[in-house]
Image (cartoon, rainbow, N blue to C red):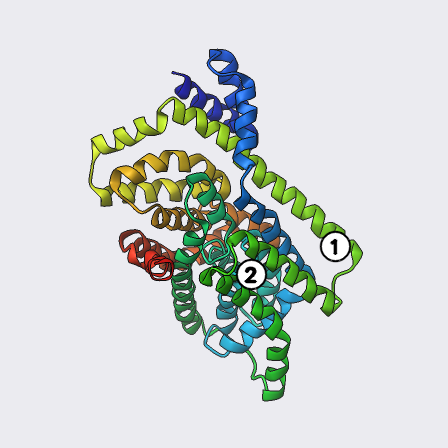
């Protein structure tokens, strides 16, 4: 009864417009007072315990690294290098958009940093070359979904912390799915660009190409150091976040493109964004604790298994639920709500938790860009000021290859598990 009341109160608070972290905290406190089952101090203790985790230290550092890269001239150098490599392919600026997102995702771990930093640069570059504004926005929106899959990744850190799964294993498992997402997107962009006769970039001479490459060498070393360090076990994911921040700060200082005023703004944004994420995790810990003690996740698992014990049908059901949630809610909020329900289900169907983590995050990220109510669509609309109906039409073809990758990752575990198995064994 207490668990059901908790869920009802939570939904009521959400529908009333209260932020999700506050809704989880208020509903947890309320049921403790109403049922007098647990002392309210127990909720406070669970909130503190939920954020008292070494791996969560990486979150503010990844956010800070992304902010520094956007301000310190690193993002521009990455974009110019990506354009040099793939810009001559039909649909060149679209490929540059995706390729730059893949590179940047290996540095910041934040989809927000990707969209906010590269987003404006990518869309302006595409529209300046004659690409439709809505198509440019659609490519930018969908390419940003790659960031939370390729390491480092803040959503994977949150999933690993809540599900008690190795962050390093999750990071390694995301590499192949992330690359597949990028390649599949580029294939669709190529098809659309050839059909619409979009231009490629102008020819860049050898001299200019060497200048662009020279300027990009140091920024490009960042993902090599971070991802390579994690893969070889030299540094932990948390240490990788610190390395990324220090490296970005050194480069930005050397480039002379960041002043004291910008540094203050960066630190303020980092504090606000980090505090928001940590608050969500803390509130979710107390919320999920009550649910678990009251046996709600177990009851949900038993209900699903009573309907079907077929592993593949259960996976399809989970995909549908996660995609729908991703269309209506912010990614980290979904993770904090859904993970307590997933843990017993993972055990029941015999699924590897690392594989599940990749599938869950991939679902949530695709949901954010899925019409008609994907949250990323409205974010990109605010930035680009495009017609929403036209944006929906442009996004749908780009979502299709991502769905195909999702199905492959869901039903062929080896895609995400082959690297962790090879490297960690």
Residue 404, can we see it?
A: no
Q: Residue at x 60, y 75 (%)?
A: 217
Total tally of numbered discs in the picture: 2
Judged from this view, the residue extending furthest toward the right is 260
Q: Distance between the residues labelled 2 and 1?
A: 19 Å
> Could you tell which of marks 2 and 1 lies nearer the N-terminus?
2
- Tell me the element at label 1: helix
**Is 45 positioned to the left or the right of 5 in the image?**
right
Q: How crowded is mark 2: few (under 14 residues within 10 Å), some or many (20 or more)?
A: many
Which mark is on residue 83?
Answer: none
Q: Which residue is drawn at 48% across and 25% down?
A: 10
Q: In this view, does 42 lie above or below 220?
A: above
Q: Where is residue 347 in the image (x, y as percent from the top left)?
A: 29, 39
Do the residues under discs 2 and 1 have CB atoms within 8 angstroms? Answer: no
- Name the quadrant containing residue 300: top left
Q: Which residue is drawn at 45% across and 39% down?
A: 162
Q: Where is residue 239 in the image (x, y as percent from the top left)?
A: 56, 54
Closer-to-camera residue (408/221): 221
- Tell me the element at label 2: helix
Which mark is on residue 263?
Answer: 1
Residue 93, can we see it?
A: yes
Q: Which residue is drawn at 40% across and 23% down?
A: 293
Which mark is on residue 107?
Answer: 2
Q: Position of residue 127 (x, y in %)?
A: 58, 67
Closer-to-camera residue (69/44): 44
Q: Where is residue 395 in the image (x, y as percent from the top left)?
A: 45, 56
Q: How crowded is mark 1: few (under 14 residues within 10 Å), some or many (20 or more)?
A: some
């Amino acid at each position: 009864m207490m668990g059901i009341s908790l869920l009802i109160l939570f939904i009521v608070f959400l529908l009333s417009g209260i932020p999700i972290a506050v809704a989880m905290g208020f509903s947890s406190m309320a049921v403790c007072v109403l049922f007098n089952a647990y002392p309210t101090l127990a909720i406070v203790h669970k909130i503190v315990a939920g954020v008292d985790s070494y791996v969560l230290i990486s979150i503010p550092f990844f956010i800070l690294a992304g902010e520094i890269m956007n301000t310190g001239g690193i993002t521009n150098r990455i974009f110019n290098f990506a354009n040099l490599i793939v810009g001559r392919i039909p649909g060149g600026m679209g490929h540059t958009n995706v390729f730059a997102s893949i590179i940047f995702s290996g540095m910041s771990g934040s989809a927000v940093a990707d969209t906010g930093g590269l987003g404006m640069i990518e869309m302006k570059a595409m529209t300046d070359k004659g690409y439709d504004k809505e198509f440019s926005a659609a490519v930018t929106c969908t390419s940003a979904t790659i960031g939370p899959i390729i390491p480092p990744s803040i959503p994977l850190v949150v999933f690993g912390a809540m599900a008690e799964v190795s962050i390093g294993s999750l990071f390694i498992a995301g590499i192949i799915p992330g690359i597949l997402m990028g390649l599949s997107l580029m294939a669709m962009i190529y098809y659309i660009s050839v059909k619409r006769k979009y231009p490629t970039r102008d020819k860049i001479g050898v001299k200019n190409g060497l200048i662009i490459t020279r300027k990009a060498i140091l920024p490009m070393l960042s993902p090599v150091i971070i991802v390579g360090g994690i893969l070889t076990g030299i540094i932990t994911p948390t240490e990788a976040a610190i390395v990324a921040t220090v490296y970005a700060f050194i480069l930005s200082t050397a480039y002379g493109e960041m002043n004291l005023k910008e540094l203050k703004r960066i630190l303020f944004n980092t504090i606000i964004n980090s505090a928001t994420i940590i608050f969500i995790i803390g509130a979710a810990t107390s919320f999920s604790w009550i649910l678990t003690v009251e046996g709600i996740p177990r009851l949900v698992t038993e209900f699903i298994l009573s309907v079907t014990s077929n592993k593949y049908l259960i996976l399809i059901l989970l995909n549908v639920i996660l995609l729908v949630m991703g269309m209506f809610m912010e990614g980290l909020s979904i993770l904090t709500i859904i993970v307590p329900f997933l843990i017993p289900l993972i055990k029941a169907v015999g699924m590897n938790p690392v594989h599940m983590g990749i599938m869950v995050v991939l679902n949530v990220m695709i949901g954010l860009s899925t019409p008609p109510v994907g949250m990323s669509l409205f974010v990109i609309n605010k930035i680009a000021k495009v017609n929403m109906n036209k944006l929906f039409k442009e996004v749908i073809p780009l979502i299709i290859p991502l769905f195909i990758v999702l199905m492959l990752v869901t039903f062929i575990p080896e895609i995400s598990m082959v690297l962790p198995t090879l490297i960690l064994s």
